[in-house]
Image: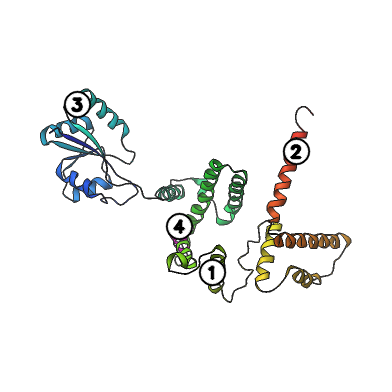
Amino acid sequence: MPARIVLLVTSPRLPAGLLTAAAWDVVREFPVFAAAETGQSEALRTAGCDLTVTGDPVAALLGAAADTGGAVWLAGPGGDEAMARDLGMRLAREPRLAELELMYGSWDPPGARLLDAVTVTDRLSGPDGDPWRRTQTHRSLARYMLEEAYEAYDAIDSGDLDSLREELGDVLLQVVLHARMAQDLPEGEAWSIDDVAGGLVDKMIRRNPHVFAGGDAETVDEITEQWERIKAAEKAGTDPMASIARSQPALSLAAEVQERAARIGLDPESALAATAGGSAATDEAQESGRALAARLWRVVAAAGESGLNPEAELRRVALAVAEHAAAESGPNR
């Protein structure tokens, strides 16, 4: 039976020593070699495995395979492709020496690269990291959150899914940056990306009992009503307008205000009438501005009754005009 050389690849994002049963069998049966000390090598030694760090992996593996019938190479975080290629070429020339086998001792679970995003952000925020990052605050970064969200919206609107993937990464960067900054708050006030993710998970489970708790909502309308009912119960006694993003564009802001006002029985026209006498106009320009705002308010209300998004519709027209204007002002004009 030919000797075995096993290239053992493991995920650097999982705790050291968390390996499959097959991987544990092979590292206990044969001598193990690695290019450097890692958490994984320490875990194997602690478990009683015979592990050696070597600078000449091909010779070490071939020698051990000849002596004991097998050897294991514990690949580093990058996979050690160059070493694997050199060893593969040697065995292709001399196949009698050993059979080469690739084994995955562990692999990344879905979402594992999010851990890399956290690690990179920690490095940027450290003493030897990025000076620009260390001078930022939640307020100084706020505009980037809006910019990145708008760029992601543009990618969605244009149907460019490759761009959407990149833009969502930029949005994620903002989330991770703000969470990392919050870790430096005083004790008792600090929170982390785990708190952000944990809060999201708790909310998703709480507001979707039809999935997680045997609820009986089935249709989209029933699920939507259930979500709003649970949300209202969570926020009982709070201002229904408190969580509205006041920095959003005016048309979308008006649409959201109208929607929430309707939940408490206030229709758009009554709400508009109630604010008309708030303060007297001081000049003709101010009076004209209020009249314009009233017309826009009613347009938003009509859009809502028709199931249209006024912000999206106006945006679509504006971009079409911009495209037409760009064509009209081309080099031949």
Residue 193 - label = 4
- Earlier in the chain: of badge 4 and badge 3, it is 3
- Give neighbour class at mark 1: few <14, some 14-19, many 20+ (Cα, 10 Å): some
Q: Quadrant of residue 92?
A: top left
Stretch in magenta: 194-199
User: Whole-Å distance between the Cαs marked 1 and 4?
Assistant: 28 Å
Residue type of the residue flagged with mark 1: Gln
- Earlier in the chain: of badge 4 and badge 2, it is 4
Horizontal side, residue 14 vs residue 237: left or right: left
Residue type of the residue flagged with mark 4: Ile
Q: Is residue 15 above or below residue 241?
A: above
Residue 155 - label = none
- Give neighbour class at mark 3: few <14, some 14-19, many 20+ (Cα, 10 Å): few
Residue at 23 percent across and 48 percent down: it is 42
Residue 281, percent across and down?
85, 66
User: Whole-Å distance between the Cαs marked 1 and 2?
Assistant: 45 Å
Quickly name the residue at label 3.
Answer: 95
Residue 226 - label = 1
Mark 2 and mark 4 in contact (Cβ < 8 Å)? no
Residue type of the residue flagged with mark 3: Pro
Mark 3 and mark 1 in contact (Cβ < 8 Å)? no
Residue 63, percent across and down?
15, 31
Residue found at the far left of this picture: 67
Q: Is residue 196 magenta?
A: yes
Q: Is residue 86 above or below residue 242?
A: above
Residue at 18 percent across and 51 percent down: it is 47
- Earlier in the chain: of badge 1 and badge 3, it is 3
Secondary structure beneath label 1:
helix
- Earlier in the chain: of badge 1 and badge 4, it is 4
Residue 56 in sight from this viewpoint: no
